[in-house]
Amino acid sequence: MVKKLEYPIDRIHQNLALRKDKVVVAYYRIPNTPITITDSDKKDSHKTKVAQVIKKLAKYKNFDISLIDFLRNK
């Protein structure tokens, strides 16, 4: 038996997607932060910023973070 999957998105407007169950999902792209492997201060600063953002997002309890290979998607 083959089960057909239904596409969950009803429509898209800019960075918002309206799902068929009427849930709205927002997508954001965060710019790349180039850091050399020898720049420990910049790496530590970036790790701190990322940790702070994730901590702020945690209160919403429903979020996903995806890392996308930006070179492959150009």
Image: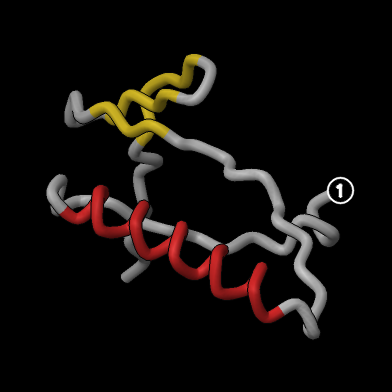
Q: Residue at x 19, y 24 (%)?
A: 22
Query: What percent of the width, then of the height, locates residue 20?
Result: 26, 28
Q: Residue at x 18, y 31 (%)?
A: 21
Side (left or right) of 19 relative to 46: left
Q: Residue at x 44, y 66 (%)?
A: 48
Tally of numbered tags: 1
Q: Quadrant of the N terminus?
A: bottom left
Q: Residue at x 71, y 52 (%)?
A: 32
Asked whether 8 or 62 is in front, the reply is 62
Residue furthest bottom in the image? 38
The kind of secondary structure element at disc 1 is: loop
Asked whether 10 or 12 is in front, the reply is 12
Query: What percent of the width, then of the height, locates residue 57?
Result: 26, 49
Query: What percent of the width, then of the height, locates residue 59?
Result: 13, 49
Asked whether 20 or 55 is in front, the reply is 55
Reading the image, the residue beneath label 1 is: 74
Query: What percent of the width, then of the height, locates residue 12?
Result: 47, 21
Side (left or right) of 61 relative to 38: left
Colour scheme shown: secondary structure
Q: Amino acid at mark 1?
A: Lys
- Neighbourhood count class around disc 1 (C-alpha, 10 Å): few under 14, some 14–19, many 20 upward: few
Using the image, determine if residue 41 lies above or below residue 71. below
Residue 6, quarter of picture = top left
Residue 54, quarter of picture = bottom left
Using the image, determine if residue 48 lies above or below residue 73. below
Residue furthest front in the image? 41
